[in-house]
Image: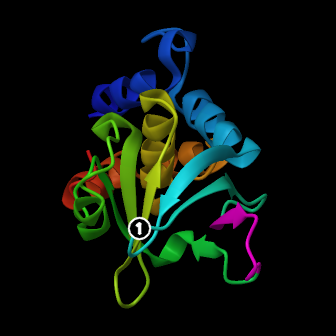
Amino acid sequence: MASVLASEMYHVVGSVATSQGCRLGQMVERCMSVMQSGTQMVKLKHGAKVLVRLFYLDEHRTCIRWRPSRKSEKAKIVIDSIYKVTEGRQSEIFHRHAEGNFDPSCCFTIYHGNHMESLDLITSNPEEARTWITGLKYLMAGISDEDSLVKRQRTHDQYPFEWLRSHNLV
């Protein structure tokens, strides 16, 4: 199972990672670093509204934020509120924007909150989408940094992998 996760991370960081040269924890850290630096993405809204925003993972790795926003305190999604992350143009919002010629490998949706709201995003390239999708799935599994990954592996090597599998995230 570890090789499946390593393969997933290899997909994210490309040639930087080699199957034997990098530990999984280092690859997760690289992914988190990219997310914390921020990525400019297109945010699809209900109707025909399309907004370009900078999305980033906060310094505590507990929520995703974006700017600019008129509602700065509401412009966030707490990681613990994320229900699932889907790849491609699967959401209702993407279907409404059928006229948009978006590359499905650059699209993903974050479902969050009690009412399973969707945040539909488009990156400029597939690697950025893959980084965010994979990073969010690791955060949802509680693997936010190398230390927590090592602790989990020490206490119960299979826990994060079993959690990911049980939630159909890998």
x%, y% of residue 37? 75, 42
* Extent of the magenta region: 62-72
Q: In the image, what residue occupies the spot 43% across and 46% down?
A: 133
* Residue drawn at the location 31% of the way across and 67% of the way down: 93
**Disc 1 target residue:** 48
- Label 1 sits on a secondary structure element that is loop
In the picture shown, does residue 123 fall above or below 78?
above
User: Is residue 148 visible in the rendered structure shown here?
Assistant: yes
Task: Please name the residue shown 64% across and 45% down the image.
Answer: 40
Which of 161 and 117 lies nearest the eye of the viewer? Answer: 117
- In this view, 16 is above or below 44: above
Q: State the image coordinates of residue 62 (x, y, percent, origin top left).
A: 65, 67
What amino acid does circle 1 point to? Ala
Q: Quadrant of the C terminus?
A: top left
Residue drawn at (37%, 59%) of the image: 109
Quick one: 82 or 56, which is closer to the camera? 56
In reply to whether residue 65 is colored magenta, the answer given is yes
